[in-house]
Each structure stands twice: as structure tokens, then as C-alpha cells.
Image (cartoon, rainbow, N blue to C red):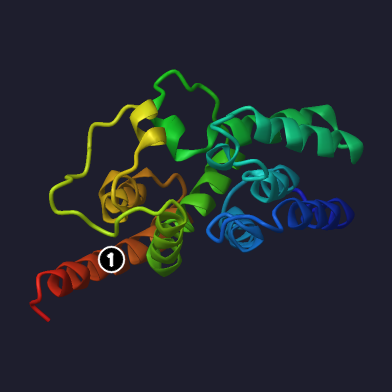
Amino acid sequence: MTTLDAKLTEATIDFVKTELKNAEGGHDWFHIERVYKNSLLIAEQENVDLTVVALAALLHDIADPKFHDGDETLGSKVASTFLIKQNVAPEIIKHVTQIIDNMSFKNSFDLNTSFNSKEMEVVQDADRLDAIGAVGIARCFNYGGFKNRALYNPEIEPNLAMSKSEYKNSEAPTINHFYEKLLLLKDKMNTKTGKQIATERHLYMEGFLKQFFAEWEGNL
């Protein structure tokens, strides 16, 4: 496992903080920081290039398509432009941008996605961990509020057979997102560490939903 370039990492952190200073609360710098820290934690047990892992973790949401009219190419373009200015080696830039372009959950709907690497598996697990557990629940409702979505509507059932387009354009109540994504992530983890942490966070979400529905029905 390689060592981190401290100067490059610091420059990247400063860049991301500036770019995301007005970001929605679930996709702000603090989300990036958590993914970065979890990536380094998971990487301790994996044979990976730490520079690639760190840069991909820090830049993975630099231009999230949800906030840029669905443009799925902008993130890697912004990241590439920044890394070129930092004189990062072309092969590292290519690897980082491939991770940014392919790691999102919505890409799991695309069966033609062929890129994969151990570095992407690490960052992908770290990002997915931040979508579940206590923080994941908070982020889910924060985004639902940001989009002015209903908390829950018993008449709108979760869509468990969505296409990528349907997933991207969904306006379903926030609770549905647990069934359409969050509760599925535990079984999509790549690494041993990711799986262990996801199991605990998954159980926490199940407990939350049990409590939520009991309160909703007036049973508590």
C-alpha cells in the first residue's frame, strides 16, 4: 500500500471545501470528510494505492449530478481539471476519474458498466456506509426536505424494480428510499471491513423503521 502525498491531499481538501461551501447538507464537505476517513479505514485492510483512494474519496461528489441538471460527466471533468493543475500523473487522474464516473449507486442499474478496481471498491464502500446507519437516516431526510418530499405515504409503495432513469427521476416519499436503496446496500459491500460496518448500520435502520411505523400507526 502506497503512502499519501500530504501536500496534494491538503490542496485537494481546500479545493473541495471551497467548491462545496454552499452544498446541500447531505452532500457537503462533512459528507466528503466522512467518506474520506472511512476510505482510509477500509484501505488499511486492502492492497490499494492510497493516493488514488484519497483523491477519489475527496473528489467523488465535487459535482454531484443531482445538483447539476443530471450531468453525469461534470464531476470527472472538474476533478480532472483540478488534478492536472496539481501536476498529478495522468494514470492517477484517469483512475480517479474512472472511479468518480462509475462508483455511484445509480450505476448499478447499468449492466454495461465494466470498470472496477480495488480502489473503487474501497471508496464505494465508504460512500455507501455514509448512506446508512444514523448518519444515513439523517442525510436521507435532509435531502427529502431539500426536495420537499413527503415523509411517508402509505398509498405509494416502494418501486423495487426501477430502471436507472426511474431512480434518477423519482419523487417518492423519503421512507420509500430506504427500501429502494438504503436497505440494499449491506449486501452490495465489496470489502470485509465495509461488510462488517454495514451490518451494524443496517440493523440500526431496521430498528428505526420499526419505531417509525409504530409511531405512524399510533401504536406507541
Residue situated in front as seen by the camera: 58 or 146: 146
Residue 137 appears left or right of 120: left
Tell me the crowding category of disc 1: few under 14, some 14 to 19, or many 20 or more residues within 10 angstroms, Cα based. Answer: some
Residue 47 appears left or right of 153: right
Question: Where, by quadrant of the figure, is residue 21 drawn?
Answer: bottom right
**Residue 128 visible from this viewpoint:** yes
Question: Residue 159 location, x and y as percent?
Answer: 22, 38
180 to 114, vertically: above or below:
below
Question: Where, by quadrant of the figure, is residue 217 drawn?
Answer: bottom left
Pick out the residue farthest to the bottom: 220
Look at 75% across and 58% down and name the residue there.
Answer: 17
- Number of numbered discs present? 1
The residue singled out by tag 1 in the image is 203
Callout 1: SS: helix
Of the 4 image quadrants, the one containing the C terminus is: bottom left
193 to 1, vertically: above or below:
below
Question: Residue 46 location, x and y as percent?
Answer: 58, 49
Q: Amino acid at mark 1?
A: Leu
